[in-house]
Amino acid sequence: MKKVFSFLAIISIILVSNCTQIPENDNPVIGIWSDVEVAPASLTGKSETVRKEWIFNDAYLGRYHRKSNGSITFKTDFKWSYENDTYTISYPGTDMESKIVSMRTSEDGNTLADSEGHTMALME
């Protein structure tokens, strides 16, 4: 009797797991976005390159990196949502402010811009 019950339990688990479907997220923001800033040379004579990178995935999550001269100086996870042609990016667990951005398409490529129209990042 135990074998029959175990067999039925396994069959029911397989049937239930095959019935669920993960909705496909094909939002155009998915991918890697970056912004590079070059600070002028300081008293040491070296310029500093700061690269900010947002990696958006299809589970409405992502990873943010800030790199200085190629070394990661800060990284954290973020959440993102899409509503009314705007994206809200929040950084839970940090003191970083949420950002509300929109995607702009041009001949040069896609950009993320803030509400004032300033470019935040370019798609790679």
Image (cartoon, grey):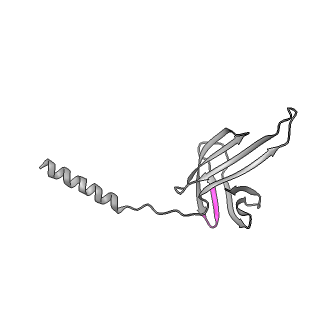
Report the number of discs.
0
The residue at 74%/64% (across/down) is: 108
Horizontal arrangement in the rendering, residue 11 relative to residue 114 (left or right): left
Magenta stretch: residue 123 in it? no
Residue sitting farthest toward the top: 44
Residue 105 vertical position relative to residue 57 in the rendered view, above or below: below
Image coordinates for residue 82, horizontal then vertical, percent? 59, 62
Horizontal arrangement in the rendering, residue 116 relative to residue 58 (left or right): right
Q: On the image, which quarter does residue 70 sit in? A: top right
Segment tinted magenta in the rendering: 83-88
Residue situated in front as seen by the camera: 38 or 10: 38
Q: On the image, which quarter does residue 22 sit in? A: bottom left
Image coordinates for residue 68, horizontal then vertical, percent? 72, 39
The residue at 28%/55% (across/down) is: 13
Residue situated in front as seen by the camera: 48 or 3: 48
Magenta stretch: residue 85 in it? yes
Q: On the image, which quarter does residue 119 sit in? A: bottom right
The residue at 19%/52% (across/down) is: 7
Image coordinates for residue 100, horizontal then vertical, percent? 67, 57
Which quarter shows the C terminus? bottom right
Image coordinates for residue 117, horizontal then vertical, percent? 76, 61
Assign the magenta stretch its main secondary structure: strand
Residue sitting farthest toward the right: 43
